[in-house]
Image (spheres, rainbow, N blue to C red):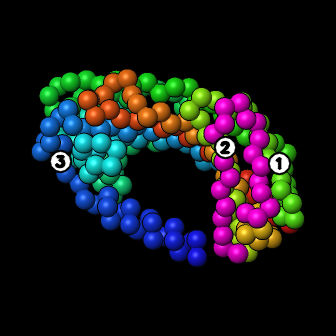
């Protein structure tokens, strides 16, 4: 059921993403900016992306009209019309960088991404389901504006569960037995994520914006 629900959510998102407006048709000071830097350790790839919305975080997506443009570390980000974002992929880990957006009025908005803190699995091969499990990671404890999460995607029951903590200074997550039991016994893919989210930006219009960073790493374990 969860898999079907996720598919419906994705399809809904894609349908909403198709509804866009050109930035030339809106007041430039009404543009809300979203900047993201995402590193996937398993793929050893970093993706820098930006998206723009009219009026606020839930506003309609915008296609920025030439000569407006957005860059990351001097590289012009390319439009992905299906997702409504501007993005660029990089090999290896880029743990920080700077976005620069120039609007149609010629105003320049600069936002630097804070340094991304890595995270990794400690030695773990199996996770029991008959009792709660204390999961700890290798790397810094939860820092300000960070969330650490682990998603366990089981194969036998076609189900996944997400466990997370945003408590400052935390070094572990308690995986409760009720959620673990829903996953089913067998091999499962675990995705460990350290996410950073700030609800405001230094360089933005009166509508503001936000910055996200993600560090993901995957591992296969056996749920027993």
Residue at image position (73%, 75%) is 156
* Kind of element beneath mark 1: strand
Residue named by callout 2: 165
- Badge 2: few (under 14), some or many (20 or more) residues near its Cα, within 10 Å? some
Q: Position of residue 122 (x, y in %)?
A: 81, 42
Q: Is residue 114 above or below residue 218?
A: above
For the residues marked 2 and 3, what is the alpha-carbon distance in whole angstroms?
38 Å
Tell me: residue 35, above or below residue 161. Answer: above
Q: Based on the displayed image, in which of its 4 quarters is residue 146 positioned?
A: top right
Report the residue marked by disc 3.
22
Q: Quadrant of the C terminus?
A: bottom right
Q: Is residue 58 magenta?
A: no
The image quadrant of residue 158 is: bottom right
At 20% from the left and 32% from the top, the residue drawn is: 29
Element under disc 2: strand
In the picture, which quadrant includes the N terminus? bottom right
- Range covered by the magenta-colored residues: 157-179
Q: Name the residue beneath numbered marker 1.
A: 134
Q: Nearer the viewer, residue 171 or 15?
A: 171
Nearest the viewer among 188 and 168 is: 168
The residue sitting at the left extreme is: 25
- Left or right: where does residue 40 sit relative to residue 52? right
Mark with earlier residue (1, 2): 1
């Amino acid at each position: 059921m969860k898999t079907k629900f996720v598919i419906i959510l994705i399809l809904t998102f894609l349908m909403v993403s198709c509804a866009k407006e050109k930035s030339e048709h809106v007041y430039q000071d009404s543009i809300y900016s979203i900047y993201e830097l995402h590193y996937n350790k398993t793929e050893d790839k970093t993706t820098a992306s930006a998206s723009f919305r009219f009026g606020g975080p839930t506003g309609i997506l915008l296609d920025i009209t030439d000569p407006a443009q957005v860059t990351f570390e001097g590289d012009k980000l390319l439009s992905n019309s299906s997702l409504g974002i501007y993005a660029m992929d990089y090999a290896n880990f880029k743990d920080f960088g700077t976005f620069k957006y120039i609007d149609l009025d010629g105003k320049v908005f600069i936002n630097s991404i804070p340094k991304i803190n890595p995270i990794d699995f400690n030695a773990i091969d199996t996770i029991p389901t008959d009792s709660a499990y204390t999961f700890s990671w290798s790397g810094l404890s939860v820092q300000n504006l960070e969330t650490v999460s682990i998603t366990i995607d089981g194969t036998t029951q076609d189900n996944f569960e997400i466990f997370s903590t945003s408590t400052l200074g935390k070094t572990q997550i308690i995986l409760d037995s009720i959620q673990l039991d829903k996953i089913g016994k067998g091999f499962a893919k675990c995705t460990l994520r350290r996410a950073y989210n700030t609800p405001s930006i230094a360089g933005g219009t009166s509508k503001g914006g936000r910055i996200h960073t993600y560090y993901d790493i995957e591992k296969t374990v056996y749920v027993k």
